[in-house]
Image (cartoon, helix red, strand yellow):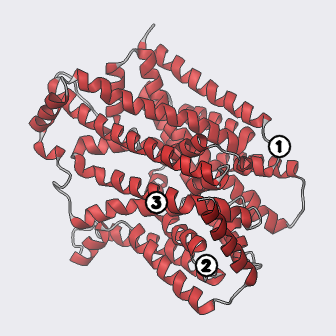
């Protein structure tokens, strides 16, 4: 059989497994809490791997190795920032959000938690939060579909639209029917695939390049600066790279996993598993790029066209075609895990945070679950329509969507969990200022790319927009909350009960 046949077999097995997991989860989904939050019954390993797989997407297997291959270890600062941010998120946010979201009327979405935490009877905060999630994640999902179409186009020479339909069809099927449980269970498989692939390539690669010392020597022959963390780096650039970690506190598709974990004890175990998975996976991605530099230096007859393809190409060189097919499936898994996670959060925002409030109807759980599935389908169709033209502007939006969510929601989540005096007015003001600041800063950074840009414009262009957005949101939220704060016995009681339970079960 040809290599492509083996690869198609591997991808077929992978996609069939995803659909089977979706069917299995469908049989275990009885009510809205099951569909939107897995009944708050995720174990430590499932919660940890689900959060990791939802987070990393194709950047882990293609974007990061490609950046390291092209520019060296100076590009690894983002990985350092993400690791620190993820750990702090697990350590500070995860345990308290798990407890507090349950105490506040068993909230199952981020907008409903903020509303219930602040006793916002106007419903404005919940609606605005839901709209932000709905709009931005629809574009986010669309970008993932673009990545899926491009994956099949570049890997197999298939038509872009056929690849888009294949990826979208499988993801939508298991997400629509199985809901949060299907997303979480498939994330476990996808997370393990990503992890094993990123460990296997560099391990085999070290032997192929003659050992650690030979590998390092070959990289130095290409350019000694590639092994230096600071060559070509500026202080502002390093700070901006590290600031990626701030985004974790406000990513709905990641922090909702904390709400779904079974208990505080499981949260602590999940933190250890999740951070270990992340460190080893990031190390594997970085090492894969370095192995690639050494291997192609030692084999000048071979060429690597696109640096972002270094993981895929090495997998095809080092392994049997069937195994290489599963390496390709790992890339697809990274793309699909993020799409499905964003789909279920967007569906939750549409049904739980917008439909219920707009129509004020009391429906049965089965009706709400049906609406959730309908929401997944509608959002998917809109996202696919946006992705159909393979419009680069969608990908441009995603470049700062991480910053937008981090700046709009991150400070609010931290203050809601750790500060008694947060108010609805403060949260609304901060959310708007954070989101707008990211957009405005990004626009000013675009201006900085003009040839006649001033030093100030160049500085703005070099600073990652999450930094001003996050801290402006934090400052505005605190100031407005202090001005508008009035003591509320119910809010105080719930806050104190959360603190008590955290200490009691520590």
Percent position (x, y) of residue 164? 56, 36
**Identity of the residue drawn at 80% across and 68% down:** 358
How far is mark 3 from mark 1, CA to CA? 34 Å
* Residues packed near mark 2 inside 10 Å, few (<14), some (14 to 19) or many (20 plus): many
Residue labelled with disc 2: 428
Q: Is residue 136 left or right of residue 5?
A: right
Seen from the viewer's position, the closer of residues 206 and 406 is 206
Residue 88 is tagged as 3
Residue labelled with disc 1: 30
Percent position (x, y) of residue 277? 45, 41
**Identity of the residue drawn at 71% across and 66% down:** 112
Asked which secondary structure carries label 1, the reply is: loop
Q: From where the camera sits, is residue 310 visible?
A: yes
Residue 430 is tagged as none
Q: From where the camera sits, is residue 157 visible?
A: no
How far is mark 2 from mark 3, CA to CA? 25 Å
Percent position (x, y) of residue 419? 57, 77
* Residues packed near mark 1 inside 10 Å, few (<14), some (14 to 19) or many (20 plus): some
Seen from the viewer's position, the closer of residues 76 and 358 is 76
First reached walking from the N terminus: tag 3 or tag 1 = 1
Seen from the viewer's position, the closer of residues 419 and 424 is 419
Q: Are marks 3 and 1 in contact (CB under 8 Å)?
A: no
Which quadrant would the C terminus be assigned to in this image?
A: bottom right
Residue, far top: 1
């Amino acid at each position: 059989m040809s290599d492509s046949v083996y690869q198609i077999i591997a991808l077929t097995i992978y996609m069939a497994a995803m659909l089977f997991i979706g069917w299995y989860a469908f049989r275990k989904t009885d009510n809205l809490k099951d569909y939107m939050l897995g009944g708050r019954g995720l174990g430590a390993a499932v919660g940890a791997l689900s959060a990791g797989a939802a987070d990393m997407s194709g950047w882990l297997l293609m974007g990061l190795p490609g950046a390291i291959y092209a520019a060296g270890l100076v590009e690894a600062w983002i990985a350092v920032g993400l690791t620190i941010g993820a750990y702090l998120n697990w350590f500070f946010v995860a345990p308290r959000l798990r407890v507090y979201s349950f105490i506040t009327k068993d909230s199952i979405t981020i907008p409903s938690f903020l509303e219930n935490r602040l006793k916002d009877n106007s419903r404005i905060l919940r609606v605005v939060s839901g709209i932000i999630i709905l709009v931005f994640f629809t574009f986010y999902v669309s970008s993932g579909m673009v990545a899926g179409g491009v994956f099949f186009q570049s890997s197999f020479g298939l038509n872009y639209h056929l690849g888009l339909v294949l990826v979208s069809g499988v993801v939508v099927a298991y997400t629509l029917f199985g809901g949060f449980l299907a997303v979480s269970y498939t994330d476990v498989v996808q997370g393990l695939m990503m992890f094993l692939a990123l460990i296997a390539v560099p391990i085999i690669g070290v032997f192929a390049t003659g050992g650690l010392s030979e590998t390092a020597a070959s990289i130095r022959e290409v350019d000694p600066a590639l092994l230096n963390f600071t060559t070509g780096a500026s202080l502002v650039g390093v700070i901006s790279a590290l600031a990626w970690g701030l985004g974790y506190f406000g990513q709905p598709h990641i922090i909702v996993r904390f709400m779904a974990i079974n208990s505080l004890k499981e949260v602590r175990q999940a933190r250890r598993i999740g951070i270990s998975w992340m460190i080893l996976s990031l190390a594997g991605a970085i090492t894969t790029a370095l192995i690639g530099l050494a291997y192609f230096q030692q084999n000048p007859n071979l060429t690597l066209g696109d640096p972002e393809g270094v993981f895929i190409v090495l997998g095809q060189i080092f392994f049997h075609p069937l195994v290489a097919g599963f390496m390709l499936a790992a890339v697809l898994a990274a793309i699909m895990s993020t799409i499905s996670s964003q789909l279920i959060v967007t569906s939750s925002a549409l049904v739980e945070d917008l439909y219920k409030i707009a129509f004020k109807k009391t429906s049965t759980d089965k009706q709400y679950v049906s609406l959730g599935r309908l929401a997944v389908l509608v959002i998917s169709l809109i996202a696919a329509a946006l992705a159909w033209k393979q419009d680069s502007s969608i990908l441009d939006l995603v470049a700062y969507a991480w910053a937008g969510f981090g700046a709009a929601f991150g400070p609010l989540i931290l203050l809601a969990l750790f500060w008694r005096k947060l108010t609805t007015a403060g949260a609304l003001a901060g959310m708007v200022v954070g989101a707008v600041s990211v957009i405005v800063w990004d626009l000013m950074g675009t201006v900085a790319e003009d040839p006649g840009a001033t030093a100030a414009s160049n500085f703005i262009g070099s600073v990652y927009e999450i930094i001003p957005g996050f801290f402006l949101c934090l400052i505005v939220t605190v100031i407005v909350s202090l001005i508008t704060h009035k003591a509320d016995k119910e809010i105080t009681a719930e806050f104190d009960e959360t603190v008590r339970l955290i200490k009691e079960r520590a």
